[in-house]
Image (spheres, rainbow, N blue to C red):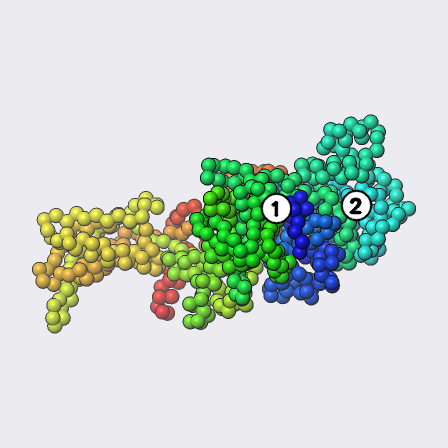
Amino acid sequence: MKEYTTDQIRNIVLLGHGSSGKTSLVEAMLYASGAINRLGKVEDGTTVTDFDEEEIRRHISLSLALAPVEWGGCKLNVIDTPGYTDFIGEVISGVLVADLALVLVDSVSGVEVGTEVVWAEADKKNLPRFVVINKMNRENANFEQTLEKLREAFDGNFVPLQLPIGAAEGFTGVVDLVRMKAIVGSEGKEEDIPADLVDQAEEARVALVEAAAEGDDELILKYLEGEELTEEEIQRGLRDAILKRTVVPVLVTAATANIGTRPLLDALVAFAPSPADRGPVKAEGPAGEEEIEPVETAPLAALVFKTAADPYVGKLTYFRVYGGMMESDTRVWNSRAEAEERLGTLYVMRGKEQIPVERLRPGDIGAVAKLTHTVTGDTLCHRDHPVRLPGPEFPSPLFAVAVRPKSKADQAKMGPTLTRICEEDPTLRWRQEPSTKETILEGMGEAHVEIAVKRMENRFGVAVETSTPKVPYRETITKVNADQYRHKKQTGGAGQFAEVHLRLEPLPRGAGFEYEWEVFGGAISSSFQPSIEKGIKQVMEQGVIAGYPVVDVKAVVYDGKEHPVDSKDIAFQIAGREAFKKVMLGAGPVLLEPIYKVTITVPEEYTGDVMGDLNTKRARVLGMEQRGGKSIITALAPLAEMQHYVSDLRSITQGRGLFSMEFDHYEEVPPHLAEKIIAEAKKEREEK
C-alpha cells in the first residue's frame, strides 16, 4: 500500500442501526476500489470486516473493523461499527478517531433506535457527517419519506447531494447534483440526467448551491448577485459547510448491488475533511495542556482506541497517529504506564488481514502486535516529550452474570481469559464479589455478555456456566444487646477456658466496625484483646442470620474470666466468636440490601409505562424532567429488582429507552422479603 500524506487521508466511521447495511457498504467500497475481486455477503459470512466466528454465525457485526480504501489519490480509513446497542463501546471508540461520520439509514425503515443512539454519540464529539440512504433497491424504498424522517428526528440541514434514479427493483443509479450528471449501474457510467428527473434535479441543485454559498462571504455575495458558482466554488463552499457542521449532505446507495458506491467514494474524497482540516487536538503535556498539530514535525502522539486479543497473533493494538510519525521497529513511551514499548512491524488492517507498512503519518490509523503494557485509551509518545490524549469514555455496565468454570482445567485459565476479553472490550468488566464469593462478569446487555462467554470458549478454550448473580446483602443490628459466653474444653491434657461478656451497639449506616475494651481490674488480661477481636471478625465475614457480612456494629468487651493455665489465644477466639453470634441474635438482626441510583431517559410517550414498571420494582422516583422530547427519570431502586432491567426497559420502550445505574447506599430489606432470603440461605447451608 503506497504512502499517503495527511491531507490525502480521510478517517470515516460508519454508523447506523443494526442491519442498515454498513458492512455490505464497506464490501462494495473495497470491491469498487479493486482491493478485493469479489463482493462478499454478510449472509454467507464472506465479508472482509465481519471475520469473527460469532459475527459469521450471527450475521451481525460485534466489534469495529478497519478497511482502508484507496480512491482518487486518497486513502479512506473506513471504520465499520456494530449497530446493535449492546456494542456501543465499539461505536464510541470509532467515533473518537474519525473525522467524519457516515450515517447509514435504511430506505424503508428510516430513522430507527440505533440511528438515534449513534447520532447522539457523533454529536458528543462534534463530528461532521454525511447521511447515506441505503438499500434503495428494497421493495417500498422511499427516498423522500426517509429524508423527511431525518429532518423530523434531528437538528441538521439535510441537503441532498444526489437524487436516486428509480427505486426498489428499478433503482439504477444516482444524479450527481454538483456535476449535474447521471451515474448509473455498478460500473458508475456517466450519462445525461433522465428527462423525467431534470426539473427535480434543477430544483435540488439550487438548494445545494445555496447551502454551499451560505458559509462563505465571498460566495454568498457572488450568488446573491445572480452569478453562477463554478464547480470548484461549490466544492469549496460545501467542504467548509460540512466541516463546520452547518450542512449534512445526503447520498443514496444500494450497497449489495454496488450501485451508488463510486459516486459516494468520489464525494468522500471531495468533501470529507482530512485530519489536517480538523486541525490540532488538545493533550496533557509536561507543562499542562498543549495542542498537537497533525504535522510530522510535531511531538509524537498516537491514541490507542482498540485492543484485539487473538490466541494466535497475541495482542493487536489499534491506534491513530495525531502528531509526529510512527515508524516500524522503534521504541515509544506509554505515558499512562510510564513504560517503554518496543514496536515491531506496523500494520494497516483490512479486516483481519495485516498489511505491513514502514511508517504512518499524522492522521493515519494502524496497528501493532504484542505490546506489553498498552491498553485501550493509552497514548504512545516520545519518552522525552510525554503527552496524554483524551481516551474514550465508556458507559458503566448494565447487566451482570455470575460465572463458574465448568471444569478444573477451566478454573486455572478463567481469570486470565476474563482479563483478556475485558481488555479487548472495555465495556465488559469482571470482578470477584467477596460477600457472595462469586466471579461477576458485567456488560451492556444480555447479548453482549453471552457473546463474551462464547468467545471465551471458542477463542481461548475456557468454558464457563453463567447464572444471575446473588445480591450482595449485608447483615446488621437494630438495638443494643449484651450477653456472655463461656468456652470450656477439658481433654486428657491441657484444657481450654475463656469467658467473654459482650455488648453490641448499632452504628450509623456506612460506619463499618468498631471494637472497644471496657475490662478493668484484670478480669481478662489485655493480651487476649486481639484474640477476641479476631474471633468476632471471623463471624462478621460469614454472617449470623443468612451468611452475609455483618456491618455497622460496635462490639464492646466489658467483662469476662480467664484461667491461669487453660486460657489461650484459641480459647478466647472461640469465646469471642460464639459470644458475638449469641448477642447478635438478640440485638434485632436485619438484612440490608444495596440500593442503586438509576437515571432513565425515554421518549415522552413511554413515561407512564416506565413509571408503572418502576412501581412494581420497589423503586422510589426522585424526580423527572423533560428535555427535547424525552423524559429523564431519576429513581432509587434495590439491585435485587434491577438485575434484568436492561431487557425490561428495551421491551417497554421498543429499544428507545436508555439508563445508567450507580450504587448509592444500603438499606433494610422489608421483613416479608428478608424472611424468604434467610430461609433460602438456611436451606443452601443444609444442602452443603
Q: Nearer the viewer, residue 400 or 76?
A: 76
Q: Foreground mark, 1 or 2?
A: 1
Residue lying at 81% horizontally and 45% vertically, measured from the top left: 176
Spatial separation of the CA atoms under disc 1 and disc 2: 29 Å
Residue 580 lies, in percent from the top left, at 24, 56
Q: Residue furthest right?
A: 195
* Mark positioned earlier in the residue sequence (1 or 2): 2
Give the quarter of the figure containing the N terminus.
Answer: bottom right
Q: Which residue is mark 2?
A: 162
Q: Quadrant of residue 446?
A: bottom right
Left/right placement of residue 206 relative to residue 292 reads: right
Residue lying at 74% horizontally and 44% vertically, measured from the top left: 270
* Label 2 packing within 10 angstroms: few (<14), some (14-19), many (20+): many
Residue lying at 71% horizontally and 37% vertically, measured from the top left: 241
Residue 61 in view in this figure: no
Q: Nearer the viewer, residue 415 or 347?
A: 347
48 relative to 360, above or below: below
Residue 490 lies, in percent from the top left, at 13, 68
67 relative to 267, above or below: below
Left/right placement of residue 542 relative to residue 267 reads: left
Residue lying at 74% horizontally and 63% vertically, measured from the top left: 38
* Numbered circle sitting on residue 61: none
Give the quarter of the figure containing the C terminus.
Answer: bottom left
Q: Which residue is mark 1?
A: 363
Residue 669 lies, in percent from the top left, at 40, 52
Left/right placement of residue 336 relative to residue 209 reads: left
Q: Secondary structure at mark 2?
A: strand
Residue 14 lies, in percent from the top left, at 66, 51
- Given the image, on which type of amino acid does mark 1 rest? Gly
- Given the image, on which type of amino acid does mark 2 rest? Gln
